[in-house]
Amino acid sequence: MTLDPEFSKQTTDLIAQTLELYKTAGASPRIGETWDCANIGDFLCGFFVGEMVGSALSAFQIVHQREPTSDEHLEIIELVESHAKEIKEFFAKFN
């Protein structure tokens, strides 16, 4: 593991807290129409995962003042993937 433990913890907390916000807020009824998608849950799931990876990569750059290495980038993705079951279960409700 190349990410420092504090960054990993903060990223894991961000993922969990953001998912809880999504659970509270729900989804806009216009998503399917606006983005022309048939499977709203799949769209939202992909959006959420992209948002979490992007946010973590941005945070990494701010904290470390550099781009992540390929190994660090993969570890960030793995942090998001470690929540895959909960993420998929929640967003499947919108399909």
Image (cartoon, rainbow, N blue to C red):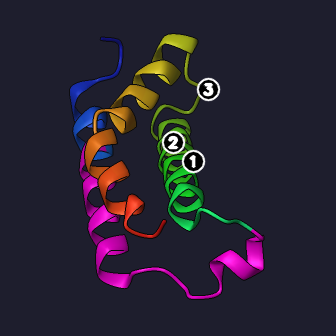
Q: Would you say the residues marked 1 and 2 are in contact, meaning their CB atoms lie under 8 Å apart?
A: yes
What residue sits right under mark 2 in the picture?
A: 53
Disc marking residue 50 = 1
Are there few (<14), some (14-19), or many (20+) residues within 10 Å of tag 2? many
Badge 1 element:
helix
State yes or no: residue 17 in magenta: yes
Q: Main secondary structure of the magenta part?
A: helix
The three-letter amino acid code for the residue at tag 1 is Gly
Measured from the top left, where is residue 83 in percent x and y? 29, 41
Q: Would you say the residues marked 3 and 2 are in contact, meaning their CB atoms lie under 8 Å apart?
A: no
Measured from the top left, where is residue 23 in percent x and y? 30, 73
What residue sits right under mark 3 in the picture?
A: 67
Using the numbered discs, state the Cα–Cα distance from disc 3 to disc 2 in whole angstroms. 14 Å
Is 86 above or below relative to 67? below
The three-letter amino acid code for the residue at tag 3 is Glu
Using the numbered discs, state the Cα–Cα distance from disc 1 to disc 3 in whole angstroms. 17 Å
Q: Quadrant of residue 1?
A: top left
The three-letter amino acid code for the residue at tag 2 is Val
Q: Which residues fall within the magenta stretch?
A: 12-36
Work out whether residue 57 or residue 27 is closer to the camera in this orientation and state it: 27
Q: Earlier in the sequence, mark 1 or mark 3?
A: 1
Residue under the image location 37 percent in, 83 percent down: 25
Work out whether residue 16 or residue 56 is closer to the camera in this orientation and state it: 16
